[in-house]
Image: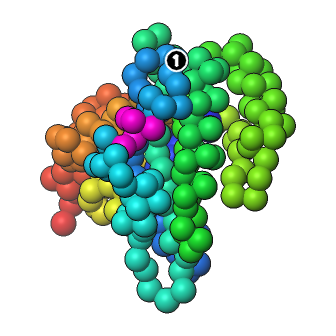
Amino acid sequence: MYSKISEINIKLFLLGYLRRLAKDVAQVRRIPLTLPVMESFEVSQLAFEVRRQLGLSERDTFGVALTSRKPRGPGRARPVLMLDWGVRGTTRDSRLRIGALEAWLTFCCQYLAAQCPKDLRLIACLAIEIDQERHPVLEDTVRHLRADARFRNRTFRLELLERLDQIEANDLADFLNGPGNSSCPDDILLDVPELIVKVTGGQFQETVNLIEQAERTGWYELYDELSAQVGQPSVRVRMKDELL
């Protein structure tokens, strides 16, 4: 889990990182999932919602769903499913109570980890965006949950990753350049990360919004828009002004 992050967010950067550094030992596939919309829910409610999202019948096990989605790769690369549970806490309506967090962990441990095929590994990621003064509460909560006997077994491990407040242009460039991460054209790939970070100040939500905008409406359009905002001539303008 992370605090102070957003929707394409750090998890896709993590996915790119895993694919880049572990490409010879792991074949990674991302599975998007969502929690129930209410701020508090029970394990049974979450299980019902996940069954619906995965298209499972009442007789199907979660192990069946995991097996059918297992990535296939060359050689002996281990298959890894990255279960992306989205972001909670970005608005007042999407806040999450501690009981709901506990229900999510229980589901991941007792339903998913317990039914995971032996040759498959799962990484379940939930992003939580909260005010800075609430970070100690989150950290203390996870510390106590990690000590809970229910979450201390050989098939499950709980980690609270360090919060990331800003993103650097180099990290963004690595992500955009990663295979399957974006459709950013090569001729503007060197400039786009710097432009985005200049405009957003490296803030995750604003950065994510611009990436999503570019994927919807086009990277050249975003490039021209950001270039105008920072007073930098776009590639196409520079090309027209250059001497032959």
Residue drawn at point x = 76 percent, y = 33 percent: 145
Residue 16 horizontal/vertical position (percent): 49, 59
Quarter occupied by the C terminus: bottom left
Q: Amino acid at mark 1?
A: Ser
Helix, strand or loop at mark 1? loop
Residue 31 horizontal/vertical position (percent): 40, 52
Q: Is residue 6 left or right of residue 135?
A: left
Locate residue 125: give its quadrant.
Answer: top right
**Foreground of the two, 240 or 16:** 16
Locate residue 190: give its quadrant.
Answer: bottom left
Residue 74 horizontal/vertical position (percent): 44, 86
Reading the image, the residue beneath label 1 is 40
Residue 53 position (above or below residue 25):
above
Q: Is residue 129 visible?
A: no
The stretch of residues the image draws in magenta is 47-51
Residue 83 magenta-drawn? no
Residue 121 position (above or below residue 56):
below
Q: Is residue 190 left or right of residue 131?
A: left
Quarter occupied by the N terminus: top right
Residue at the far right: name it: 147
The secondary structure that most of the magenta stretch takes on is helix
Residue drawn at point x = 72 percent, y = 50 percent: 157
**Foreground of the two, 168 or 66:** 66
Q: Is residue 52 left or right of residue 128?
A: left
Residue 95 position (above or below residue 29):
above
Q: How is the image coloured?
A: rainbow
